[in-house]
Image (cartoon, grey):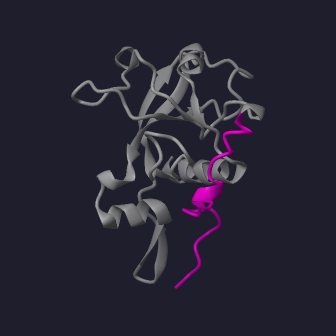
Amino acid sequence: MTSPPPFVGAYPPDGSFWVPSTEAAKYPWRYGDLVTTPADAKSYGAVDSKERPWRALMLTHPSCELGVKGAPNGVQAVRVYWLREVSQRQRTQVILGFAEVNGHTQVTRANQVYLAPVPGHASLGERMYADLRQTVRIPAEVLLAAGRVSAASHDARLAVLRRDVSFR
């Protein structure tokens, strides 16, 4: 078996995926952060086929600190799902991000980014994934008003960026 390339599916341990809530205010909003879906989600297309708001959003653009560079069409975010909503085989592929096929390592589920549970959060305290194919653009001020759920750690941000590069 060949070794996987660095960070392909190599997410940090769940306990170090998110910045501790006591320290989050020290970190600017950035790529990979988990944010609350705005109350007027339908206005931005952040609703499912039954018009229910998405569980949460993960920021994907801009890749730098929010507000440093102008985002003329709003901030890009992607939909967040419970990991339990997919089969056990798919869960493993999302968490690992790669599989051995015929003696070679290949990327699997490139569009799906593993997200650890948010410690102490009432509704996002279980394993999740973000789908890079399901995007919305929402004005920064709307997201700021909705609130950040959790700031991604440096290692989590690198892993998410790596998945995004594999997907694109």
Q: Is residue 84 above or below residue 30?
A: below
How many numbered marks appear? 0
Q: Position of residue 163 (x, y in %)?
A: 54, 53
Specify start and end residues of the magenta stretch as a single range: 1-24
Q: Position of residue 33 (x, y in %)?
A: 60, 37
Q: Quadrant of residue 24?
A: top right
3 in magenta:
yes
Does residue 111 appear in the picture of this structure? no
Report the predominant secondary structure element of the magenta stretch.
loop
In the image, 19 versus 4, the foreground residue is 19
28 in magenta:
no
Q: Does residue 95 appear left or right of residue 153 in this picture?
A: left
Q: Is residue 71 above or below residue 128?
A: above
Q: Is residue 49 above or below residue 163?
A: above
Q: Quadrant of residue 50?
A: top left
| Picture residue at 62% right of the left edge, 57% below the top | 15
In the image, 121 versus 133, the foreground residue is 121
| Picture residue at 62% right of the left edge, 62% below the top | 7
Q: Position of residue 134 (x, y in %)?
A: 39, 36
Residue most toward the left?
Answer: 50
Q: Position of residue 137 (x, y in %)?
A: 48, 22
Q: Does residue 119 appear left or right of residue 107 in this picture?
A: right
| Picture residue at 53% right of the left edge, 20% below the top | 146
Does residue 29 appear in the picture of this structure? yes
In the image, 51 versus 127, the foreground residue is 127
